[in-house]
Amino acid sequence: MSTALEKGVFLIATPSLRDPNFRQTVILLCEHGHEGALGVVINRPTEINITEVLPQIPIIEGQRHHVFTGGPVQKNSLLILYRVPEEPSDTHHVVDGVYLGGNVQTLERILEQPSNNEAFRAFMGYSGWAPGQLENEMQTGSWLTLPADPTWVFEKDPAVLWGEIIQSLDESYKIYIDMPVDPTLN
């Protein structure tokens, strides 16, 4: 099964993808077009708390939200994914109720007055591809695709997400589920 490359699709790293930036990752593709592609890795939380990244926002103090590694590009830039019923300003639509941007007012409102199913995830950096680069990686078997599910982004345990998805796509990948991200460390 293969889903067309477009925003709102998950890119799932195949077990053969050895690049340490992308090994065993699930990426939400947020943009795809003639200028290239942009996405964020949704299954690599860091130990960094959002209060360390946005200390100037008082409502964030004391929050226990960890920042995720979005990818190897511009690691010092913060991107925020929001799951909200209406598109916030300064963001753009990714998939069903999910928007990407840096709108701090929306973040403050979600923390002050959260509504049902509203959530956010903060990412340092992003994953990017030049025009045609992602398509070439698809042809070499580096990625599998699947329509994105917002609940997987905001509710699933990131530690097991890659394994669950990869096994659901192809039962023969089951042997890779418990493989460490970096096998040389074991």
Image (tube, helix red, strand yellow):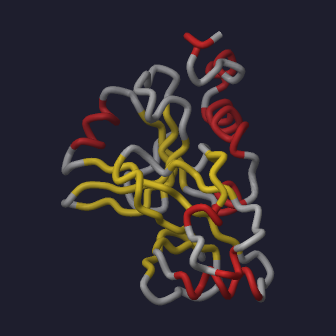
- Residue 96 location, quadrant: bottom right
Residue 133 spot, x, y in % from top left: 23, 42
Residue 169 spot, x, y in % from top left: 61, 35
Residue 62 spot, x, y in % from top left: 77, 69
- Residue 32 location, quadrant: bottom left
- Residue 141 location, quadrant: top left
Task: Report the side of 146 relative to 36 (left or right).
Answer: right
In the image, 182 versus 117, the foreground residue is 182
Q: Say above or below: 38 vs 55.
A: above
Q: Say above or below: 36 vs 54.
A: above
User: Residue visible at 52% across and 74% down?
Assistant: 99
User: Residue visible at 53% across and 68% down?
Assistant: 80
In the image, 175 versus 124, the foreground residue is 124
Residue 28 spot, x, y in % from top left: 50, 54
Name the quarter where the C terminus is drawn. top right
In the image, 61 versus 97, the foreground residue is 61
Q: How many marks?
A: 0
Task: Report the side of 29 relative to 42 (left or right).
Answer: left
User: Residue visible at 32% across and 26% down?
Assistant: 140
User: Residue visible at 53% across and 86% down?
Assistant: 87
